[in-house]
Amino acid sequence: MAITESDRNYLLPKAKQAEVKRTATFPQILQMLAPAGALLAALILHLTLPNVYPKGYQSVTYPAFLKTCLGIYMIFGLAAFLLPKLRAKMLYLSWLLTAAVLLVAALDMATLKTGHFRLPFVPSPDKILSSVTSNLETLAVSLYFSMKLLFTGIVIGIISGMISGILLGWSQICNYWFMPVLKMIGPVPSAAWLPIVMVLFATSRQASVFLIVLSIWFPLTLMVSSAIRDTDKRLVETARVLGASEVYIMLHVALPAALPAMFTGLFMGLSSSFSALIIAEMLGVEAGLGWYIKWAEAWGEYAKIFSTVGIFIIIFFILMDTLFRLRNRLLKWQKGTVRW
């Protein structure tokens, strides 16, 4: 049987293995250069091809954005040659970044360079980026109010969801009386609550927080209560035989067993909370990203809508990535499980 290059590396002493890992191969270098090549190609195409629609339009923000991204990526690329972990991360993300750059370049070609997509419904990348720089103060204020509203709802939703999930999962009485209530009001969409919350709450902010809390509370309560009820009965009985109290068993046996389901509920609730945030900010709040989208739509400023949706995507990606990292850290005791 032939010995492969990886087999040879495995047979080397540990010091030599580390040296092999620290050295980037030529295919790896080409793969890491793919996003930089895509950025450079997008910049050259934008600067060389004439602007067809609108005719005579002078773009400023998009070329500067491409140059900035290219410079930042090259700095990280040079650092990756010295840091194996950074190089592995860049190799993993290289094709995704390349595809993203090519997608933006294709939008530039289809709008500004050919006029295939017309204003105002499909703006060019330069129009989208310019809408951010020209309305930076308004966007910053809207982002602050949206994140304040979102995190207030998320924190209250997590606390209330954990408490109700533990009670429904551990107590037969609570499960008997409140599980039907959970099944009735939980699946109701946030939009259906709008007329009711406008009457029940004194201010639009309180109503908005309630909608976000509800979007987090329902999936978290459902997943935690189900996981606690499904805890291995042998572990519970063993703890009781050893003299553990009910509170100790709940905190040290049932709750750790429910952690994977808790994160599943958080993932589900986080995605629903963003939808609830947009709906909540249509209740008459004075600032927020949802309010900003509604205002831009009223004036036909679709570039501002695209830029705000992009901000939402970035925020959601950061929150989901943070949640994944937290899950991996807290559940590192799980061995041999398939994670998504």
Image (cartoon, rainbow, N blue to C red):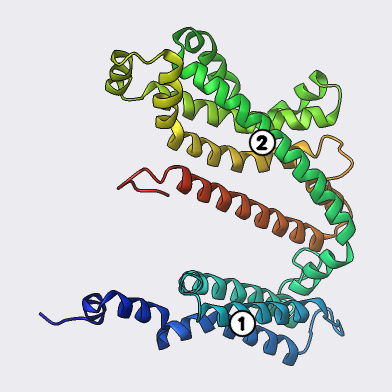
- From the top left corner, tell me how far across and down residue 60 is, in percent: 83, 80
What residue is disc 1 on? 74
- From the top left corner, tell me how far across and down residue 141 is, in percent: 86, 51
Local packing at callout 1 (Cα closer than 10 Å; few below 14, some 14-19, many 20+) is: some
Q: Is residue 8 left or right of residue 120?
A: left
| Residue most extreme to the left | 1
Which residue is at a point 74% across and 66% down the rendered structure image?
122
- Number of marks: 2
- From the top left corner, tell me how far across and down residue 67 is, in percent: 72, 82
Q: Nearer the viewer, residue 251 or 65?
A: 251
Among the 4 quarters of the image, the one containing residue 105: bottom right
Which residue is at a point 57% across and 50% down the rendered structure image?
322
Local packing at callout 2 (Cα closer than 10 Å; few below 14, some 14-19, many 20+) is: many
Note whether residue 190 is visible: no
What residue is disc 2 on? 154
- Label 2: state its secondary structure: helix
Tell me the tag on residue 244.
Answer: none
| Separation (CA) of disc 1 from disc 2 | 38 Å
Q: Is residue 318 above or below residue 333?
A: below
Image quarter in which the N terminus is found = bottom left
- From the top left corner, tell me how far across and down residue 20 is, in percent: 35, 81
Q: Is residue 117 left or right of residue 241?
A: right
Q: Is residue 9 above or below residue 50?
A: above
Q: Is residue 295 above or below residue 205?
A: below
Give amino acid for label 1.
Met
Q: Nearer the viewer, mark 1 or mark 2?
A: 1
Which residue is at a point 39% across and 31% down the rendered structure image?
257
Give amino acid for label 2.
Ile
Q: Nearer the viewer, residue 274 or 301?
A: 274
Q: Is residue 59 above or below residue 220?
A: below
